[in-house]
Amino acid sequence: MSSEIEQRLRAEMGTASDSRPDWIAVELRAARQRRRRVRSLQVAIATFAVALGAIAVSPSVTRGANFEPAFGGGPTVEDDYRLPAFLALTLTAGISIALLGAARRNRPSQGSTGWRRMWPVLTFIPVAYPAAQLIELGSQWAMVAQTAAIPCYPLLFWLLAERVGEQPNRFVIAAAFWSSIGVTTVLGTVALIDEVLVRSNNQHLWRLWPNRGQEMPGLDIPLGPEWTVNAIAGRELVAVVLIAIITALSLRIIGPDRPGVAALWVPVIVYLAIATYELLTPWGFHIDFDFFISDAVLGSVIGELTFPVGPVDLVSSIALGIASLSMGLLLWSWGGPAPGRKREAGSTDPKREEPPQR
């Protein structure tokens, strides 16, 4: 199978040019084009990092001097997160539109077989979980949807690992996309925390939040004076970006030669990364007779992953649904699942799957 650069060389050579000088000229042009692509990627990464960093620090820049508790009717700390959340959403939407454009250019592979053909179903099954939670929090339908979503993520990681193996630089796109989504989810949850509390809190599940005057009998968790809105948001913003990078790097390192192994280990690596954040965060996820979730997103997510036998929280279900949609969009933008290969027979060469050509 010809490599991408060989195909470009042949396309630029034409049918009437076979001399050595022509080959050298085409190779030089291809090398220049490759250098331009690398520079463009570097500029894009730097621009994205600057934009994401500016969005993350903007609440502290725009913060006013005086705040009143939310239940007092005045401005709150959370109000300062509305503009950054909107900017992060705009950035995520821009990346999503670019991926949709790539999906329109890259036709789906025709060689996908077996379960690979069901990748759209794997993408949308987890979305049923937040939908059921929005209808009725903690219902039996939500429990069924949560259970059905569990096997979808390893299979989606398998398909993504195969595509990253074809072009390793794709892990950069995945890291940027997931970082933007994570930042958007955290900022959006903080900005809309009052709406979240109204929808989420009941007698079985309670989300604690600073300056909300919540009294929970039996709560014996020392959160400390550092338990503030800004501390919660700041830690989680750093955590979601690091987790996105770790996830993408895991696909890059494990995926190219062993996508099946990546399907097993990447979810474990993601879980360990979130669990590490929770261990280092005093106000992470706690259980004290009931669920007491005291940060924005990751606390409830670790609860979902640790206890996948019952719905935990509305925010975590939405986060997991968005995660599956992002994986499906990445896969679609890369041309869908890779053509099936006889990996179980020890073959990694796609030529063995093709009939001989005369």
Image (spheres, rainbow, N blue to C red):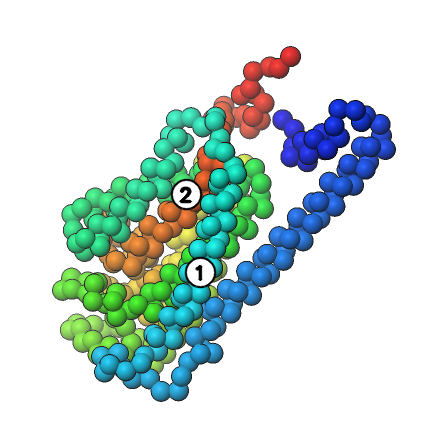
Residue displayed at 20% across by 75% down: 214
Residue 128 placement, left or right of 252: left
Q: Position of residue 201 (x, y in %)?
A: 19, 65
Residue, disc 1: 90
**Tag 1–tag 2 contact (CB < 8 Å):** no
Dot 1 alpha-carbon crowd within 10 angstroms: few under 14, some 14 to 19, many 20 or more: some
Amino acid type, residue under disc 2 in the picture = Gly
Residue displayed at 25% across by 58% down: 313
Amino acid type, residue under disc 1 in the picture = Thr
Nearest the viewer among 201 and 266 is 201
The tag on residue 328 is 2
Nearest the viewer among 141 and 266 is 141
Q: Secondary structure at mark 1?
A: helix
Q: Secondary structure at mark 2?
A: helix
Earlier-in-chain disc, 1 versus 2: 1
Q: Position of residue 334 (x, y in %)?
A: 50, 40
Q: Position of residue 127 (x, y in %)?
A: 30, 47
Residue displayed at 26% across by 52% down: 130
Identity of the residue furthest to the left in this view = 203
